[in-house]
Amino acid sequence: MDREYVRDMFRAMLKARLLESKLSSLYKAGKIVGGVYLGKGQEAVSAALGASLVKGRDIFAPLIRDQAGRTAFGEPLIDCTRTYLGSVLGPMKGRDGNIHRGRPLDGMPAMISHLGAQVPLVGGMLMARRLKGCLDGVVGATCVGDGATSTGAFHEGVNMVAVERLPMVVVVSNNQFAYSTPNDRQFACEDLLDRAKGYGLGGHAVDGTDPLACARVIGRAVALARGGAGPQMVVARLLRLSGHGEHDDGSYVPGDLRGSSLGRDCLENGIVQMIDAGFSTVEEIEAWQLEYADEVQAAVAQAQQEPTPDPWHEDWRACSVELGGKAI
Amino acid sequence: MDREYVRDMFRAMLKARLLESKLSSLYKAGKIVGGVYLGKGQEAVSAALGASLVKGRDIFAPLIRDQAGRTAFGEPLIDCTRTYLGSVLGPMKGRDGNIHRGRPLDGMPAMISHLGAQVPLVGGMLMARRLKGCLDGVVGATCVGDGATSTGAFHEGVNMVAVERLPMVVVVSNNQFAYSTPNDRQFACEDLLDRAKGYGLGGHAVDGTDPLACARVIGRAVALARGGAGPQMVVARLLRLSGHGEHDDGSYVPGDLRGSSLGRDCLENGIVQMIDAGFSTVEEIEAWQLEYADEVQAAVAQAQQEPTPDPWHEDWRACSVELGGKAI
Amino acid sequence: MSVTYVDAIREAQETLLREDPRVFLYGQDISKFGGAFKATKGLAEAFPGRVLDSPISEDAMIGMAVGAAIEGMRPIVEMQFADFSSVAFNQIVNQAATHYYRTGVPVPLTVRLPSGGTPGSGPFHSQSMEAIYAHYPGLVVVTPATVADAYHMLIDAVAMDDPVVYCEHKFLYRWLKAPRINGDGLPIGKARITRPGKHATVVAYSAMVHEAVRAAERLRDEGGWEIEVVDLRSVKPLDMDTVLASVSRTGRLLALGEAFPWGGVTAEVVARVCAEGFHLLDAPPRRLNSRDTPVPYHPKLWAAHRPTPESICIALRELLSF
Amino acid sequence: MSVTYVDAIREAQETLLREDPRVFLYGQDISKFGGAFKATKGLAEAFPGRVLDSPISEDAMIGMAVGAAIEGMRPIVEMQFADFSSVAFNQIVNQAATHYYRTGVPVPLTVRLPSGGTPGSGPFHSQSMEAIYAHYPGLVVVTPATVADAYHMLIDAVAMDDPVVYCEHKFLYRWLKAPRINGDGLPIGKARITRPGKHATVVAYSAMVHEAVRAAERLRDEGGWEIEVVDLRSVKPLDMDTVLASVSRTGRLLALGEAFPWGGVTAEVVARVCAEGFHLLDAPPRRLNSRDTPVPYHPKLWAAHRPTPESICIALRELLSF
Ligand SMILES: Cc1ncc(C[n+]2csc(CCOP(=O)(O)OP(=O)(O)O)c2C)c(N)n1
Ligand SMILES: Cc1ncc(C[n+]2csc(CCOP(=O)(O)OP(=O)(O)O)c2C)c(N)n1
Ligand SMILES: [Mg+2]
Ligand SMILES: [Mg+2]
């Protein structure tokens, strides 16, 4: 296992956790309007994917629980805080909020809410690279939840990607629930991984609470896609350790499930693993914690000071072109 | 194998073939406006399904290549000829045409064109029976092609039916092409049957050119669904022995494929099988041929004599209710 | 004790489940969880097996419900947000809407669309899709603006043999309260004069009725103007009798809506008033819609994207001064 | 030698593929087969790897094309029939249309919709969906009615940085011919006076332009009426300058369309003329659309469902006699 890869991944997990705890506090203090959606408990899966990708070359389409993946991929914290706090200097300029952010020209599209819709989008970005003759060594990746696998968009997108044999990795985080809906009301197969074969994808299962396993399995899936083995699907088993959003207490998750191995905290696991594997030390991790807490604080403070959008100066145009000197 | 079941099925195949040849001639003679879509070569699959179902109890949602299934299920020939010829006395009254016909209250919904859309519809009809407490012993069935499996509608529908564990049979006729598009541009799995496991359905493969195999495999799938084993998927391999519609010569189907075992004519196979198995005789089959040719002729003649819709007397209303004495 | 708009929706569903064995509910997270907005709270427990959680499959949800409706049930489907009905669009406009005309068999389906903007909801949790559905023959589209209408129109929608798209406004869910659910017996298809007046008519629906009333109050205070506010209640069918009668009294029309500006309810209202009651107008008719961009996330942008009492007053002052 | 409307569409795609390496085509059966209507015939052979058959996955087709457009390509997606875009609705209105406003990155995507009725096509192969897409901010919607426009507007659509819904009328495919592809240089966003007149203005688009001209000729022969016919060419944006200038000359307006009657282009045109040019009107404006049912299969019903020269003449006579 590549030491730097694992360290990158772990640092992203840690940073994301600290950032998200702060977002949660801000939400509860009424400083964030709309919703706050956390990836707590899902950082290992997300960061393993983000850390396997190279910004500037690869494509990563994160979903709602991918703060860790975004950070690992290289999204600056300030993009997050600006978007949540509505700074006009953020990538979405206050026009869209929270996890609906991205920088498409840097290979990170901004999700729309409709689940599954990003799958064909990433496929298309890869198709463009192929048509332009620069697909070599590129990977495109996206994450979805168990619930999103029920969408027609997901199905059509994955199938299309398989037909085109695009170098794509689809990571399904099966956190047992879609909002409040448990797996047994969402699908009837024994394991979502059974779908991989039905699409003609490479299939990989992983324990999402085990960061080293995530690094290995997801890293391998990305390497396979990159190496020309065609599209890959990873199914991770885990639990989200928060509500669906911070408005939700997640009380529908049964206690025994929370207490089961699925409910382990991947970050706590990660700390132990990092130390045991000799990838880091207690001291170093503590230092990171302090450093990142400051970074988070600074990103929040900065975004909070920045101007919010001004409707009088807003450019109210949905099209970029003008016709006869007039906006469309 | 139940002799009467096989004989019913075979007779439906024969009748459908005769009817469809007539429709083709009418189309070519300019007597049918719009399109004509044949099930030539696919009669065994379709009739095996239709003959396994009981009209008045079961639900059957046919698609474009299911004349044989319709006939086996009990649709009178006159419903077909009236709809193709635009008789105002037909089930669609000239408002819809060709294979877009049905009698929903008799358990046979009228397809819309959008592929995959009938899957959840049949699911809902079964759900209604469950809610009304009369689902016992009922089966719902529908047919799709290889191309339709790529639709989001198909995916969502099949998954929903699996989650609800409804007694449904989905028959996929993989005739190697969707219009002109071959399998390798439609999906990338080795076998569409691999999808069954991914949905949690019972899975069954069958050679669609072999009527007795169809009778056995599809009959068994229906019996399993009826007996409480949950939803079933059948994937039949075959070729359509006509164009996509009668406007199309199907010249994109390579000759060696036509010459392969996939290109065998199930009806010819069926004649041999019926005789070999002692289910019928040459004489009886010839008598049926004459009888059905007359029936077809009569159904065409009758529909041709009947009034076509009159726009001045047409009830131009898309809603059944009136509000304040006025149509909506 | 008071009843909110969303309470009324819940109550209506409870009444329907209790009184009509053909009714069942289908939607994401509506069962034990009670729905994203708690519009089905407690109903799964009270009516076992009749309030069902669906997979995240909007297209199949409607397809399923159409099938059940054909078989004589009266399904109510909850979309988690109106915006997600975009994925069910085909089943709504091509399966449900065409069924009666094609087969003669009506489809008594009700689709609940939590609609409209609230601060911070952003482009995909704020849309108003009534015009999209109203365009298609075969659908009835209702847009209740009061607590009582929220209740009675849902009851009436389910009683109807045809598919009804029931647009409930999320902004009204908890903000709008009434001492109790009082009805005035108006059926679907009848508009209401919410506030009588004589100088100008504002034709509005859903949450905009309340903004129109606020604007009317300001103009009364400001200059004694008496603005009549018509609540369309259903946008398909449109009650042109009530609208034209109002315009005949006032001579001036402002059509007001929260949806996007191209097409939609305001265009249909203005076009029909002009075609059917041209001579009634003493001034050019006006329209006020949202701005022509997606619904923005930031509350400050959002508030300037939709019509407000301020922008309605501006439009009305121009209309009155013509 | 003559060029048909569908030839022009094919030619435009050939030109685009030849001259712009960013262009590629995606759709069902468009490659070797050349498309259900042969609009891409021979292009797969001439431009290997750039004319691709898609699975039957309209939603993913558009999602894919949006992704490719973000990366700088200029995809043209062929829907086999406009009606099937109902399944791609979400990707069109929520992914493609919102992208520029949300991210600042435009999406140069062109979606070709084979639209409108032909005899025997029935409810699901006949729809006109321009109004549905025009309702959404962020989309340009064009409706060519001539052979030259079919060519030039497709070229212009692909040149545009924003998503364009290109509605091509199936009835015109082979029926409409021109000696060669001649352009008058009008850009998207500009309407054309197809036939000058002074007694009334018919605002039409797509195939209805030709029906309007026919009706105008009859009325000329019948009573010397001079009917002006305006071809909108693009329904979003609407060229109100040209429309209002025409109405100012004639004082009378008939808005004509083949789509369903609730909402849509005719409502938008009438509402805007009344709001912006009320004083220009000497008579109540009129609208003529299809009937309010699904498009029927039978040719006799179909012919009575859409506006015809006869029904246009009736509407115009009423308009002229006011
Ligand atoms: C098409 C669509 N329908 C409904 C929703 C509303 N919604 C947002 S997140 C969510 C649950 C998603 O569950 P899952 O995919 O398992 O992801 P998780 O939240 O568990 O990470 C739902 C129903 C949506 N965003 N898109
Ligand atoms: C959603 C949708 N897209 C496109 C079409 C147009 N279309 C009709 S049949 C067909 C091919 C269907 O192929 P398949 O499902 O394999 O069935 P087959 O015709 O081979 O029996 C297509 C593309 C459609 N009916 N529905
Ligand atoms: Mg989940
Ligand atoms: Mg096929």
Image (cartoon, coloured by chain):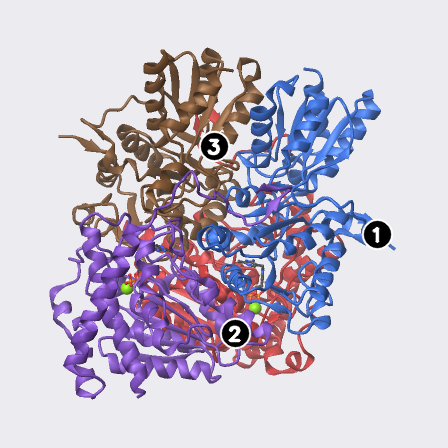
Chain colours: A red, B purple, C blue, D brown
Residue at the location (57% across, 73% down)?
Answer: A185
Quadrant of the picture in which ligand 1 is shown: bottom right
Q: CA distance from mark 2 to mark 1?
A: 40 Å
Kind of residue at disc 2: Val
Amino acid tagged 3? Val
Q: Tell me where residue C74 appears, x and y as whole percent.
A: 61, 61
Q: How many marks?
A: 3
Asked if labels 2 and 1 share a chain, the reply is: no
> Do marks 1 and 3 both belong to one polypeptide chain?
no
- Residue at the disc numbered 2: B163
Label 3: which secondary element: helix
Crowding near the residue tagged with mark 3, few <14, some 14–19, many ≥20 C-alpha atoms within 10 Å: many
Closer to the camera in the image, A184 or A80: A184
Q: Is residue A284 left or right of residue D40?
A: right
Q: Which residue is mark 3?
A: D265
Residue type highlighted by circle 1: Arg
Residue D94 locus on image (x, y percent): 50, 47
- Residue located 60% across and 68% down the image: C53
Q: Residue C180, labelled with which disc?
A: 1
Task: Identify the element where label 2 is drawn.
Answer: helix
Marks 1 and 3 in Cβ contact (< 8 Å)? no
Quadrant location of the N terminus of chain C? bottom right
Is residue B165 placed above or below C126 in the rendered structure? below
The front one of A291 and C124 is C124
